[in-house]
Amino acid sequence: MTELIGVYGASGCGRGILPIVRLQMPQARVVFIDDAAPADFINGHDVLSWSEFMYSPAGSKSVCLAIASPAVRATLAARCDHNNIPLFEARHSSVVQFDQVEIGDGACLSPFVVLTSNISIGRGFHANLYTYVEHDCVIGDFVTFAPGAKCNGNVHIGDQAYIGSGAVIRQGSAEKPLRIGAAATIGAGAVVLNDVPPGATVVGNPATILVRH
Ligand code: UDP
């Protein structure tokens, strides 16, 4: 029986990630899963509800979480865990990864992502097009890097933070890492020079707090 891989999310993010999965797993049946399916068939692939996915016959099943929202990915990962469905890592062949990089399950690594050395990353990481993570960074669970986000060395990022498109995070140091708190949002194009509190939204150059949690 064939392997079934569900790409959760049939919107913009999912349509960008499904082709990566298809390239990685040419023998598998790759479908979208969506709780509010916009159509039954998108870009040549079936769109299933969660229950349709669960009841579909298959030799094995896994789920790729292809939704940009960190909180939604965390919720859907819990659903997968509860149902003993493993998370699938989407990784484009152009991804560059150097030494001693630990990365949790279920990441989505888009084309032209670079992860250098001595990096620890949690579950369900999204590194969208042209993002990088430099040396000695520690990144929590379900963190999203929108396209072009740049994270320099010795930065610690808490769970479910969202780094907007083109944002730049200045490097910290081994003694004093630059810290982005859990569930913080970094606006597109922001230049982050200082620590960001948990839950805060920062924008601009230099980035300043727009919303404090
Ligand atoms: N979605 C879902 N289950 C959820 C939350 C979202 O199936 O619990 C789907 C939603 O129906 C939509 C997609 O995920 O089709 C998210 O699309 P959106 O355009 O909001 O975000 P993106 O594709 O950029 O992540």
Image (cartoon, helix red, strand yellow):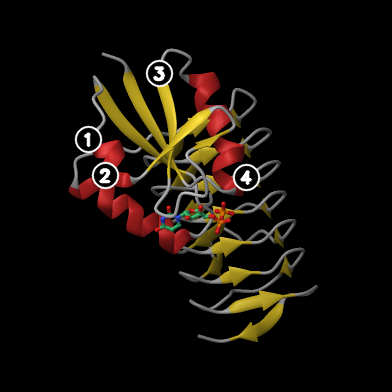
Residue placed under numbered mark 1 in the picture: 55
Q: Residues within 10 Å of mark 2 (few under 14, many from 20)?
A: few
Residue placed under numbered mark 3 in the picture: 28
The reply, left or right, for residue 213 in relation to residue 193 is left
- Measured in 3D between alpha carbons, the distance from the residue under mark 2 to the one under mark 1, in whole angstroms, is 6 Å
Q: Earlier in the sequence, mark 3 or mark 1?
A: 3
Q: Earlier in the sequence, mark 1 or mark 4?
A: 1
Seen from the viewer's position, the closer of residues 76 and 176 is 76
Seen from the viewer's position, the closer of residues 45 and 208 is 45
- Measured in 3D between alpha carbons, the distance from the residue under mark 4 to the one under mark 2, in whole angstroms, is 28 Å
Query: Disc 2 or disc 3, which is closer to the eye?
Result: 2
Residue placed under numbered mark 4 in the picture: 128
Rendered residue at 31%/16% (across/down): 2
Does the residue at mark 2 contact the one at mark 1 (Cβ under 8 Å)? yes
- Measured in 3D between alpha carbons, the distance from the residue under mark 3 to the one under mark 1, in whole angstroms, is 17 Å
Q: Residues within 10 Å of mark 1 (few under 14, many from 20)?
A: few
Q: Which mark is residue 51?
A: 2
Element at label 3: loop
Q: Residue 146 at x, y = what percent?
A: 64, 53
Q: Can residue 148 be seen in this snapshot?
A: yes
Does the residue at mark 2 contact the one at mark 3 (Cβ under 8 Å)? no
Quadrant where the N terminus is found in the figure:
top left
- Whether 23 is drawn above or below 83: the answer is above
